[in-house]
Amino acid sequence: MFESLTEKLEGAINKIKGYGKITEDNISDAMRDVRLALLEADVNYKVVKEFTNKVKEKALGEEVKKSLKPGEMFLKILKDELLSLLGNDKAELDLSKNPSIIMLVGLQGSGKTTTIGKLGNLLRKKKARKPMFIAADVYRPAAIDQLKQLGKELNIEVYDEGQTNAVTIVQNGINHAKEKGYDVVLVDTAGRLHIDEKLMDELKSINDTVKPGEIILVIDAMIGQDAINVINGFNDALPLTGTILTKMDGDTKGGVALSAKHLTGVPIKFIGTSEKLDGLDEFNPERMVSRILGNGDIMSIIEKAESVIDEKEAMSTVKKLKQGKFDLEDFLVQLKQIKKLGPLENLLKLLPGARKMGLNNISIDPKQFSKIEAIIQSMTIKERKNPDVIKASRKQRIAKGSGSTVQDVNKLLNQFEQMQKMMKMMKNGNFKMPF
């Protein structure tokens, strides 16, 4: 997401940093690069024109002219204007009612039903809510079955009445939610291949009848600038409270994120970051701008870690590391914790300077983690606690039991030995950074 845009913007920023002062000529040169970068990222041309004009005007202002570091001032202007495009503040969900009703709408194929599963999962984990799903897509039996399957996986109840009247289903579903004590109701509505009158009339009827606190449009970010027309089409008929951009982890250039809020006035509330049921993130404009400008997103890494890593086990590990008592049994526990974080390459991309370090294109084969896990699990408790006892015959047994080779076992043991040596050096205060 945004890798190409980040690279090109960094080039423009570096140009300005090389100048002793900003002039009409050199700012025009840099802004040409910014303009091309945004257009190539599929940002709407009207947005690009307005954005570059504002940045150029501010960059030629008196404050920048008097600045001793024009590069830093230019970077601040870029950041402020990008934030302005994205909406400055994070758009929170309205969960004030009990139950809070969230209606998801969108075109067919936008990922609406899967997104309901992800949103329900997020609300339960991060907001401590008790969600229920309503299957109101009465035209596609597969959509009802898909939602029921998601509900089964997440252990979230799905209310459905089959292919009857959508408005009645939603009404009855909300009454059921009140009786059962659910505090959030997520309504899955019918999608179409395009915006049509019948679709909109049904959505209007649901809105008029149950008056949801949130009407969120789910958009496939890969449709690019057509997303603007889709948002405006739905917003003309319904009071949209936000959008969710799906497939932001795919081949999308990301430009729709920089255009949507500015052109439609409808805020982005979430973005889809993977196909997994935890692959939905709250949209935070400031963090997104930080990523676009190559400064990473450390807070998202921390939040992800906090959501999946057991604090008690983490503290126990820290204590053992300090005492120099970290063994393969502890390593196995940590490996299982790391696997919960999802694809590690996605986290590496969030580190500051990831692109410059080549971490944005790195690929980590999850099979390698599974292989290490299998090798350690094929050891006895005694062997995990004291790897020094693992000699030739034990290595052969471990390799056979884990479906690997003796060379794989040796490699793991050697790497673990090096890690233990480094930890001892750190414990004794003899470890020095190699730079």
Image (cartoon, rainbow, N blue to C red):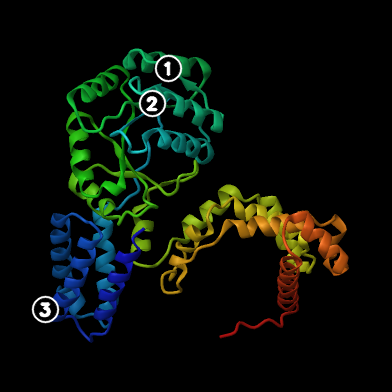
Mark closer to the observer (2, 3): 2
Q: Position of residue 221 (x, y in %)?
A: 30, 47
| Cβ atoms under marks 2 and 1 closer than 8 Å | yes
Count the marks.
3
**Circle 1 residues within 10 Å: few <14, some 14–19, many ≥20:** many
Residue 5 sits above or below residue 97 on the image: below
Q: CA distance from mark 2 to mark 1?
A: 9 Å
Q: CA distance from mark 1 to mark 3?
A: 62 Å
Question: What residue is rendered at 41% in x and 26% in y?
Answer: 142
Q: Name the residue type under label 1.
A: Gly
Mark closer to the observer (1, 3): 1
Question: What residue is rendered at 62% in x and 60% in y?
Answer: 368
Residue linked to disc 3: 24
Question: What residue is rendered at 12% in x and 80% in y?
Answer: 25
Q: Name the residue type under label 2.
A: Val
Q: Secondary structure at mark 2?
A: strand
Sequence-first disc among 1 and 3:
3
| Cβ atoms under marks 2 and 3 closer than 8 Å | no
Task: Say whether residue 81 is visible.
Answer: yes
Q: Name the residue type under label 3.
A: Glu
Q: Secondary structure at mark 3?
A: helix
Sequence-first disc among 2 and 1:
1
Residue linked to disc 2: 187
Which residue is nearer to you in this view: 61 or 355?
Answer: 355
Question: What residue is rendered at 72% in x and 75% in y?
Answer: 418
Question: Which part of the image, by quadrant, shows the N terminus?
Answer: bottom left
Residue 272 sits above or below residue 378 on the image: above
Q: Is residue 223 left or right of residue 137?
A: left
Q: Which mark is residue 173?
A: 1
